[in-house]
Image (spheres, coloured by chain):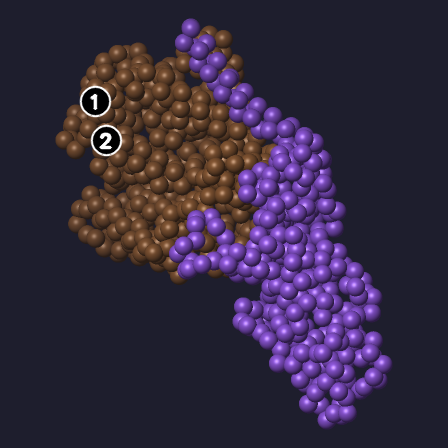
Amino acid sequence: MNKLQEIAWKEKFPQNAGEIEISARLELPRRIDLHQIPWIRPLLQSRWPQFLIRSLTLAGFIFTIFAGLFGSRVGSHNFAIIFVWIAWWTALKLAFIPLGGRSWCSVCPIPLPGEWLQQGGILEKSRRRFGLNLRWPKRLKGSWLQSGGFLLIGLFSAVTLTDARVTAWVLLGLFGLAIVLSMVFERRAFCSYICPIGGFTGVYAKIAPVEVCVIDTAICAAHSEKTCYQSCPWGLYPLALRDSAQCGLCMECLRSCPSDNIAVNLRPFGTDLAAERRGSRSFGRLDEAFLALVMLGSALAFAAVFTGPWGSLRLAAFAIGSPAWLLYGLGFLVLNLVILPGAFVTAVWAGRRWSGGKAQLRRAIADQSQALLPLGLFAWIAFTISFAFPKMNTVLSVISDPLGWGWNLLGTANSTWSPDVSAFNPGLKVALLLVGLFWSASVAQRLALTNTGRTLREILPVLAFCLAFSLAMLWLLVG
Amino acid sequence: MRKEWIARSVVLVLVAAAITVPVVAWQARSRGVVIHARMAETGGWTPESLTVEVGQPLRLRLTSDDVMHSFAIGQSDQPPVDVIPGEITEVTLTFDEPGKYTFYCTRWCSVNHWRMRGTIEVTGPETAPEVVEPPLYVTLGLDIDAEHHADVIPERKPSASLGAQLGADIPAEYQSREYYRSHSPANLWQALRSDPSLSGLSDQEVWDLVAFVWQSNTTPQDLTTGQQLYTTNCAACHGETGAGDGVFAGDLDQPKTGEHAEMQAGEMMTARPTDFTGAEHMLAASPAHLQGKVLRGGMGTGMPYWGPIFTEEQTWALIAYLYAFQFELEDGP
């Protein structure tokens, strides 16, 4: 039995007519296959464009670490703080994720050096490889560790987001961990199971209008070499992809497919939500449900600490190790591990009782957590607008003075321009939160209709949960 | 395999560049920042803004591209250093408190000499903003641009020592520092004149009492400090004798014909420097009023603002000295 046969998707391998319905779904007219567009095709087929972007992001990443370590200790004058937490963080939440899903993963520099060692090359694999190439422990699969990582970020957020040295050490730590893990485990263990940003991006990639998928499943089924799986750095098999949460959009499958059977589709927003997972009859997974809840909890906590009116909360979040911080950390963990999961589970349970549904509670939780995704993504976007937009002028000024040493390389060091969103800021935030809420409600509705086929009662408590979350965000961001 | 080697080279070159830039910059920085000084008309200081962290030494290498300048830091004990054409003068500064410091030229290099100013932003760990008390002239709500004239002026320069010899019983309220700072000599003269217990004194004797009160609110040390500051910073326009006839006074005294609209772009409105020997307006100005003029500058007159340069003590010392042009003060000039 080879590795390919062992892996989980094998059990769900489409073998009967009922499961081949996915191929019908893929032929839906509301998709545009970017790979078939003549001028885009060579850009995706060639490894060079992506490689060049990755080498630039790698150089930028290393520069960021050095700037963080040696540059000014004042956050607003240090490239590391401003580029990571204002520019990149904003771009991630406002552009990369909502428009491109895991598109950041496709150009992320963190796994590059480890993968080079692991595969013996950057563009071409060679036989001179390093590393133990172990399988990732089954128990640690899923996004649990990523949720944990995100909680850690939340616990130390106030300092990480403002102290350039700490930011540099965090980045260096992630970088080192990625290299070590690729020396010990096979493929992209760090990206798949550890990277907190990967978790964040993956869970919301389901909303994004981009997907990589197989065009004709029959061709794949007949293809015995599975070159796509062999070449996938993430260890994914395109035919077994259930949604867009896992795929890092690296395009290796597309380059190795001998039958041109992989599509890079533009698709309607939110396609993966409340759609049965390809090849499976459930909608979600418990680990993803937990991650979605952690994202909600973190959004609340970040909004309260960074944009809320409570100076003492902010001070507590800053004073790492102090009794006040311990209290803050405890509150943060209770919110994320007890209050939000408790409230959500209660809502799902109540809905199930009320509607007389017979689905397993675990499955109902996993399924209905899909409704939390638009809610969370839009809460994060609204928070980003509050937090980052007023500081946009610092992006221009650190480009000219990345280390905070009084340089003026491009003449923008003293820039005071930043988008003046004050006029429509509150309205914009309310609108974003409303879009998230209504989208979530519509996902919940679709879930209920597909699931029980008869009643909307099931989703009312979950809707109440979403409403309560939206009101809390509204209170924190708009007041 | 060729492609692979190109790819590896690209990665290594970019990574090396990403490391080299900050490291080289860091080394260059430890050698010091070169600052060029030019007359204000041709650019002033380059660079004119610097950033440094609290406690970090800032090495400056100063040189002049035209005439002799001098480099000093406002509100600090750092002695001024000369900036000489064609030579490099090194200064190492270390700041203990975060804030925005002004550096300026102390040589009268041109009529716009005072415009040779730059800033050093000293950054430090974010702290709660200090509560800064507004200066006295703001607290009192003075309109420092309003015309002010003393109705009565002395026949001769009032003398503090003559005032002391009178042995008059001046009510304590008029001798407090608060009264001194917020009232003009003319105000005090009016108040003392209407005091029945002093009705036996002549007008000139009351002026001597005013001079005595003014002197008792300053010290010989203040007057010396004030004189030094005046000579370095004010005499270029206001003149050594305070008569408003300094070396640059003529350049400033350009009566504008017509309205503001005729002014050329970049042209400054200027006025003849104030004559501190003129009793009518000087005796009607309170120390708080002068403080306003010094800190804020005179709008549309060419009078610079000295808020970022003088400390509060220096400002009061300078003001005490300005009254020495009106009063005979012991240890005064």
Q: Is residue A439 left or right of residue A151?
A: left
What SS does tag 1 mark? loop
Identify the residue at horizontal 65%, vertical 69% (top origin).
B278
Q: Which mark is residue A37?
A: 1
**Where is the N terminus of chain B found, in terms of image quarters?**
top left
**Where is the C terminus of chain B found, in terms of image quarters?**
bottom right
Residue A172 drawn at (x, y percent): 55, 30
Q: Please, is residue A439 above or below residue B19 in the view? A: below
Q: Please, is residue A276 above or below residue B256 in the view? A: above
Identify the residue at horizontal 70%, vertical 75% (top origin).
B180
Toward the left, the furthest residue is A29
Residue denoted by label 2: A266
Number of on-image labels: 2
Check the rendered structure and report the hue given to chain B.
Answer: purple
Nearer to me, A249 or A357: A249
Toward the top, the furthest residue is B1
Disc 1 crowd rating (10 Å Cα; few below 14, some 14-19, many 20+) is few
Kindly identify the amino acid type of the residue bearing the numbered disc 1: Ile
Kindly identify the amino acid type of the residue bearing the numbered disc 2: Leu
